[in-house]
Image (cartoon, helix red, strand yellow):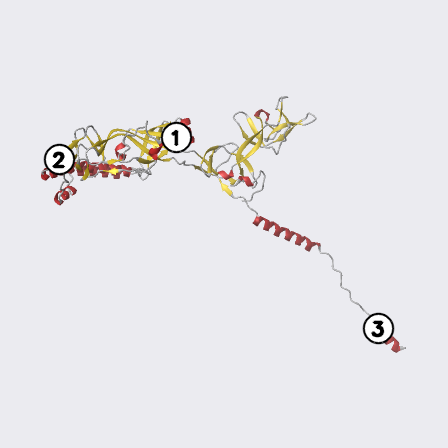
Amino acid sequence: MLAKKKNKSVNIKRYKAKKEFNIGMFLFAVVFIYLIVTITAYLLEDKPSIYEVREGSIVKDNTYTGLIIRQETTVNAESGGYINYYQNGNSKVKYGAPVYAISKNALNFDDSSTESSSTADLSPDVQSGLVTQLQTFNENYDNSNFSSIYTLKNELQNTLQNAYRTTKTAQLASVIESSGQTVTTASAGQDGIVSYTIDGLESLTVDNFTADNFNKTNYKVTELTDQMKISSGSPAYRLITSENWYVVIPLKEDTAKEFQKSDLQNVQVRIDKDSEKMWSAFSVLERDGNFYGVLTFDNSMIRYASERFLNIELILEDECGLKIPKSAVVEEQFFVIPHDYITNGGNSSLEGVMVLDSKGTASFQAVDIYDTSDDGEVYLSRDQLKSGTVIVKPDSSDTYTIDTQKPLKGVYNINKGYAIFKKVSILCESDEYYIVQEGDSYGLSNYDHIVQNGAGVSSDDVVFQ
């Protein structure tokens, strides 16, 4: 009996405990995944570039290559032979002064005479004048006026040329006398400036130049020098007989019409050769479908007597304001209403309109104003009002139905972290930038932050800087 009881056993089975759902861990996982997705999307998305508005100006490209026209003539040789000049090139001569001599055979300028001429001593008066010029320049030099160096150079050069001319004339007379040859001496037929470069365009005038004269492909200059053999009737020198001269510049049609519209009559120019600034009369000329600007000068011609083409810059007044990239500017449509319908709401300083509902009851609705025109029009956002909305004029029974729309050009200001449209008034432009009006009530201010590519943003978009 006891044995049977001992053989009886109990079978115990183990069961896995049922896990309870942990809502905390689930929420943590959801938040973690959301953060990962959000951060990844933020890193991968194209974020708009930000531009800080700054004051600036646009310097327009007003540089041209002009054609010089003077009152000049080519003087031909009276006989053939070897030519030698009494005068320096680009120097003034008086009527009757000897200009050149022609001999049948080349003159013999021996070493002693050449050496004596090249080392000729300057007179005490000339030396004193040079010292005075240098002292005056040194005492009055201004770093901001660098072109004065070129002026000094020209003044010193003229002084030395005048001193050398006397020596050269005496030397040539001495060589002619010692040669025993019969020479032909030619004198200036009138006062003027002699030049020893010939290009075949000496007969040009403002009335007969053509577009082909600006083509430098086939332009050639002949330089006449001492001991050159020439034939009778060939050019011996060029004589410029007036201080009045012209520079003709080719213009684009729109530029020419802009100058005509502005009634530009005088302009300051900068000469590229020596950075000299000068004033000239200015006029626009149309010929054979092309437009030209004609600059008229009445001094300093001798400085450019050997030039036919001159690089010059017109110094025009540049527009100043706020400089912004063209890519930032967009155009939006706005509702336009008369300014008389704008009012303030109760004790609030907010501006808005009185909207008339279907029951004939008028209630105040605040609106954002984006611009006001000189004609008394107010530009309102289309997001705050609907087309067909009826508004009431304050202190009147007159009503106005909102419907008319007009465009405004502007940019998206993001100073507050989201895009706000600000209108711009464009003053001038370059290839990449606009200069816009500063100080507009509804426009931009210096140091504002705007979206550089306005086409990729809409009003009220959140933009992180």
Report crowding for label 1: few under 14, some 14 to 19, many 20 or more residues within 10 A (C-alpha): some
Q: Secondary structure at mark 1?
A: strand
Element marked by disc 2: loop
- The count of marks equals 3
The amino acid sitting under disc 3 is Ser
**Residue at the spot of label 3:** 9
Closer to the chain start, of discs 1 and 3, is 3
User: Pointer 2: residues within 10 angstroms few (<14), some, or many (20+)?
Assistant: some
Disc nearer the start of the sequence (2/1)? 2
Q: Residue at x 53, y 27 (%)?
A: 373
Amino acid at pointer 1: Asn
Of mark 2 and mark 3, the one earlier in the sequence is 3
Which quadrant is home to the N terminus? bottom right
Closest to the camera, between mark 2 and mark 3, is: 2
Of badges 1 and 3, nearer the viewer stands: 1
Of the pair 22 and 304, the residue shown nearer to us:
304
Q: Nearer the viewer, residue 3 or 223?
A: 223
Few, some or many C-alpha atoms within 10 Å of disc 3 (few <14, some 14-19, many ≥20)? few
Q: CA distance from mark 2 to mark 1?
A: 50 Å
What x and y, as percent, mark residue 259? 40, 29
Of residues 59 and 233, the one nearer the viewer is 233
Q: Which mark is residue 290?
A: 1
Relative image position of residue 338 (x, y in whole percent): 57, 25
Write down the residue under mark 2. 183
Q: Residue furthest top?
A: 397
Residue drawn at the location 55% of the way across and 26% of the way down: 377
Which structural element holds mark 3? loop
Q: Is residue 16 left or right of residue 298?
A: right
Q: Are marks 2 and 1 in contact (CB under 8 Å)?
A: no
- Amino acid at circle 2: Val
Query: Gap between marks 2 and 3, in whole Å?
Result: 157 Å
Query: Residue 304 got which mark?
Result: none
